[in-house]
Amino acid sequence: MKRYDADRIAEAKYRDHTDRIIARLKSLPGDVWLHFAGGAEGGELSAFEEADRMAEQICREVVRACPDPELKLLWHASDALWKRQGDDPGVRANWEEGVLQELRRRVRYAAGDAGPDRDGTQEPGGDKFEASFRFDHDDLVFLSNVARRLAVLTAKPGLAPEDARTIRRAVAALQKLPELTPEINVQIEVAHRMGGEGFRESYSYAIKLDRRRIEITSSGSQGDPAVGLDSFTLESLIWYADGQTAHQGNRDIWLERLAYALTRDYAVNVTDETGRRALV
């Protein structure tokens, strides 16, 4: 099976499992889903902890019901693959743990996106905006993989809680595609540098989400600061709300570049203007 075919199938299965888990949580008595969504965004702690326990139990039941071929496929589309640097453990218990953590993360991010003040679809001032983004299967697989890479950033030591919430919001928005999150307006940048006193290199990987565009870019600069630096664009992948696209570079290489940056000493810059009018 080709890589993109496997990714498409795995992503479809993850979405189906996530939707089913959320539906089960919403069907439970005692407003379990509301406590789970509210707790993920700062609601009542005790109620959230109980709801979180129930969510984990349902996720575990779903994972244990998966046959080995499906479980292995899902593991290869989870963050566990990156943490093991592509080394398949070949053991069901390890597959289950990796898929369980991936499912729990997806459900939590969906809950955070459904929390308080996340339901607005109208622009400030009462303006309405109709978006017509167009995505093919490869686009959705790529953007889901971008979300998986972004999710890793929330564990960065010293990251401000508000920045972690913004990153989780962006992850949830990417994973919901092709369903849109009209109110979102965020930018996340990962930057890292290499070199010493003489020759230096710096690279930046940016993700911008707002009502008019989804933009994934990478850029860099090289040279001796005493002489001058050469700046350049590497990849630029843009989806516009009018259905147009502008793609430059290789999306797989973008993912590989970001994965490499996350193994180095890197900085994260987060801007969240959700609720404000996005610039045209």
Image (spheres, rainbow, N blue to C red):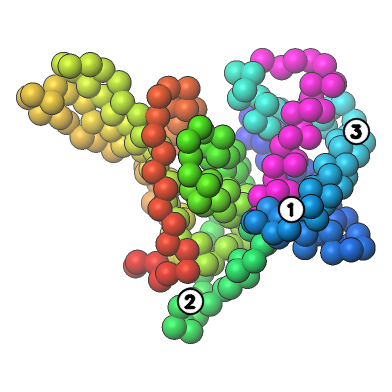
Nearer the N terminus, badge 1 or badge 2?
1
Q: Residue 76's x, y, as percent?
A: 70, 27
Kindly identify the residue that appears in the image at 55 percent across and 39 percent down: 154
Kindly identify the residue that appears in the image at 79 percent across and 28 percent down: 97
SS state under label 2: loop
Badge 1 is on which residue?
45
SS state under label 3: helix
The residue range painted magenta reads: 86-112
Identify which amino acid the numbered label 3 is placed on.
Arg
Disc ID at residue 123 = 2
The reply to whether the C-beta atoms of the residues labelled 1 and 2 are less than 8 Å apart is no
Furthest toward the left, the residue is 227
Badge 3 is on which residue?
64
Q: Is residue 46 left or right of residue 261?
A: right
Nearer the N terminus, badge 1 or badge 3?
1
Q: Is residue 272 left or right of residue 53?
A: left
Which of these two is toward me, 174 or 268?
Answer: 268
The kind of secondary structure the magenta stretch mainly shows is: helix
Q: Which quadrant of the structure image shows residue 35?
A: bottom right
How far, Cα to Cα, is label 1 from label 2?
A: 32 Å
Badge 1: few (under 14), some or many (20 or more) residues near its Cα, within 10 Å? some
How far, Cα to Cα, is label 1 from label 3?
A: 28 Å
SS state under label 1: helix
